Amino acid sequence: MRFTSLVVELIRARPRLVVWLVVLVQAAIWLILPMLLYRSPPGDLATALAFGREYQVGTWLGPPLAFWLADIAFRAAGNHMFGVYLLAQVCAVVTFWIYYQLGRAIVGGQQAVLAVLLSMTVVAFSSPGVEFGPLVLARPLWALLLLHSWQLIGQNRRNAWFAWSIEAGLLLLTTPAALGLLLLLAGFAVATARGRRVLMSPDPLYALLVIAVLVLPYLTWLLRADALAMPPWPAISDLGGRVLQWGWLLVGLVLAMSAIVLLAILNSGRFARHAGEAPIIYRPPVDPLARDFVYFFALAPALLGSLIAGIFNLDHVVGGEGVALLMSGLAIIVASGDLIHLRRQRLLRTLWAAAVVAPALVTIAATLFLPWTANEVPTSLPAKAIAHFFGDSFERRTNQRLRAVAGDPQLASFIAMSSGRPHLLLDATPERTPWLSVAKFNETGGVVVWRASDTSGAPPPDIAQRFPGLVPEVPRAFEWMVNGRQPLLRIGWAIVRPKAP
């Protein structure tokens, strides 16, 4: 007698419900976990907030949209990181919902659910998705572009042009990789007969006009800042190392989607004893153009993104792993055929749940146990306590609100998140923070911070050289979330008093 589990019946009868359930559960995990475990923002998120606070049209970090949205979410939540973490998970939910809509248009609703379930196991959609920024915001925009591109090319829906143009413009305002991604879309359209017919209409001209209007301010900034130059090409002697870097990036992509590969292997019928008794997820025949569309955008962003990153010695795939691997689950489903047998259901469910939960368990273990090995956990720095102490100390000493902070970039960015939102000055590279110079900092006053190695609190030579006459205060010690075998976090600091008008 054939046994069909409740999960399979839900996939067959209520595919949308299954998508909402699993996507919202994963989003809840990565919304609650940072609120419980992170005492400081992950990665460069604090710096992104400091840059977003200035509302610059462009900075050395790239296009401005992600930083503006991060600051808006931060302020809307009462200067609390909850707003930014929530925004990151909204991006994740929108990405998978649009991804499901694309899959439903190609393989039908039931198999589209399987594509979503597979893609959720990609590591990029777990803990890295908490760090809101250009790489996270690009994911829903790329999913929307793929959906509307297929509606234009595969379904000849001319009304999708306006949405496509808006999304393309927003992607250009989000990540420097947007131009390459749009060229991939254009290349696929030019390479197919149906795509060329779509491009022969006047609609693409109107779309280009909308895109130009959206990106004109940023393009003007690029021209004025002389930031359109290509990065230098590697020397011949460096090519071997760059090729090795490309190889490592490809290995990282394969490892990031290793759960997808393992699930596909375990579901294979080659080693199944009772293959005919497995429940079947059916789909109508896939359009050959749709098959090419899925395969192309499952491979091209990953291969080209890793190649460009290897050539220019970048530490991550251009566009991010989330964009590069977004179509990987749908590609596996398309390659599996019109009838997908779900074999070893209990094992598949267990492995899928383990793949989704494992990054959360690793994050918990690292936060609680890594300090006992005397290693620092970046998200365990007491950012709120640091910001409150130095902002309050400056106000009590000068009877003025803290307006600027400089010194150690990581610590200074934490203080820039305080309630007064002081300006961040990267004094080692002041050209990166054009809204404030060292001379202006000395005039308006502020706090200079650094990591103190002893109780004397003397500033490092480079900081002392940039701020002559700096009088250090007694270093302030802070406890970590889990102290373990680490010494207390000791921060040296000095006040630059504002000059009298």
Image: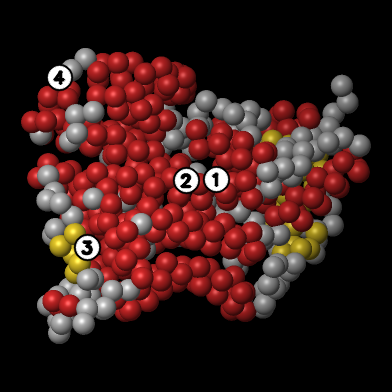
- The percent position of residue 74, horizontal first and vertical second, equals 64, 42
Q: Identify which residue is drawn at 43% across, 60% down.
A: 22
Mark closest to the chain's N terminus, 4 or 2: 2
Colouring of the image: secondary structure
Q: What's the residue type where badge 4 is placed?
A: Met
Q: Quadrant of the N terminus?
A: bottom left
C-alpha span from label 3 to label 4: 38 Å
C-alpha span from label 2 to label 3: 29 Å
Q: Which mark is residue 281?
A: 3
User: In the rendered structure, are the residues bearing label 4 and label 1 in contact, judged by CB atoms less than 8 Å apart?
Assistant: no
Q: What's the residue type where badge 1 is placed?
A: Leu
Left or right: residue 405 versus residue 62 is right
Find disc 4 in the rendering and name its residue.
200
Pick the residue in front: 44 or 153.
Answer: 153
User: In the rendered structure, are the residues bearing label 2 and label 1 in contact, judged by CB atoms less than 8 Å apart?
Assistant: yes
Question: Circle 3: is it few (<14), some (14-19), or many (20+) Cα within 10 Å?
Answer: some
User: In the rendered structure, are the residues bearing label 3 and label 4 in contact, judged by CB atoms less than 8 Å apart?
Assistant: no
- The percent position of residue 19, horizontal first and vertical second, equals 39, 55
Q: Identify which residue is drawn at 69% across, 35% down.
A: 423
Find disc 1 in the rendering and name its residue.
87
Pick the residue in front: 402 or 436.
Answer: 402
C-alpha span from label 1 to label 3: 34 Å
Q: Which mark is residue 91?
A: 2
Q: Identify which residue is drawn at 61% across, 74% down.
A: 368
Question: Circle 1: is it few (<14), some (14-19), or many (20+) Cα within 10 Å?
Answer: many
C-alpha span from label 4 to label 1: 38 Å
Q: Residue furthest bottom?
A: 273
